[in-house]
Image: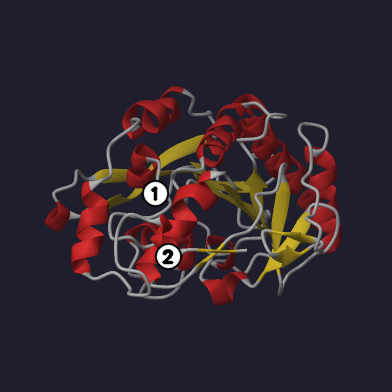
Amino acid sequence: MMQSHTLYPIGTPAQPWSAAERAQWLSRQQIRRSYADEVVSRLQASMPAAGVLVQYGELDYPSLGLPRYPLFAVRSRVWQPQRPTALITGGVHGYETSGVHGALQFIAEAFEVCSERLNLLVLPCISPWAYETINRWNPLTLDPNRHFYSASPAQEAAAAMACVAEYAPHVDLHIDLHETTNTDNSEFGPAKAARDGVAFDWHEIPDGFYLVGDTERAEPQFQHALIQAVAQVTHIAQPDKHGCLIGEPLQQHGVINNPKRQLGLCGGMSAARYVTTTEVYPDSPQATAEQCNRAQLATIVAAIDYLLRERA
């Protein structure tokens, strides 16, 4: 179903945005929650003994008059090269709340136990300005989750890639925590279409949890194991009448695939054998915020268990 260009209040139909429209978009954004209070303070208060808090960079947009945002990761205090390594990323899209809070919950509740068996690197909030303004984009109207490649123009993606290269150069498992929300159709999809001067390609929002594997590293048994684990916490999304989720054909129950490297997705930044992106639906009448966070946590723990079984 194709929607009209005129759904979005900025720009001229069929014309990509210029600097003026981008500035207009930025002027409409407001701080709606606190990265310092909700993310940084929680990290500092719940740091496990087996982890160390690392500042791996700082977001700085001086020409836009925005504050600087320190970027934090939690790394295993004792790093053992002979062990497998798991990378967990959250908040690439700052508005996807359970991606951030699921990562924080993992750090607080499961990091200590899991770190006894493997190396861990967790980046819980890659896009703090977007977290505060509840946005998909960064201040330059770039989607960080399309800019994970060399010489990235997105500071968020570039800093995250540099962090992984420095602290976890070999990754066996990568879980990237996301949500699919109703605002993907009401705000963020129309905004992207307006920015690019194209028609908005509407897709039904799936009601429930699903995973996005990598076309090049599908690992269907791995994906299946994660779906089984999450099904104990919340419901799994059913495909639409075309057998798709968000326009992508279903590969198995609750799983679709994307070419992550080709699209510049966060999940494509490492050579990990096992990689997946979670998609939680926080707007479902069948799920609570706590269930969404727990679904993210369940995915991470199940993925680590699967990796360790395969390496045994």
According to the picture, the residue beneath numbered tag 1 turns out to be 127
Residue 17: x, y in percent? Answer: 29, 69
Is residue 311 in view from this perspective?
no
Residue 268 position (above or below residue 240): below
Q: Is residue 246 left or right of residue 158?
A: right
Residue 91: x, y in percent? Answer: 48, 46
| Residue ID at (56%, 37%) | 98
Residue 183 position (above or below residue 101): below
Circle count: 2
Residue 123 position (above or below residue 22): above
Q: 115 or 42, which is in the foreground? A: 42
The type of residue carrying mark 2 is His
Using the rendered view, name the quadrant where residue 273 is placed. bottom right
According to the picture, the residue beneath numbered tag 2 turns out to be 5
Q: 66 or 205, which is in the foreground? A: 205
Residue 266: x, y in percent? Answer: 53, 61
Residue 59: x, y in percent? Answer: 28, 52
The type of residue carrying mark 1 is Ser
| Residue ID at (28%, 36%) | 31
Distance from Cα at disc 2 to Cα at disc 1: 28 Å
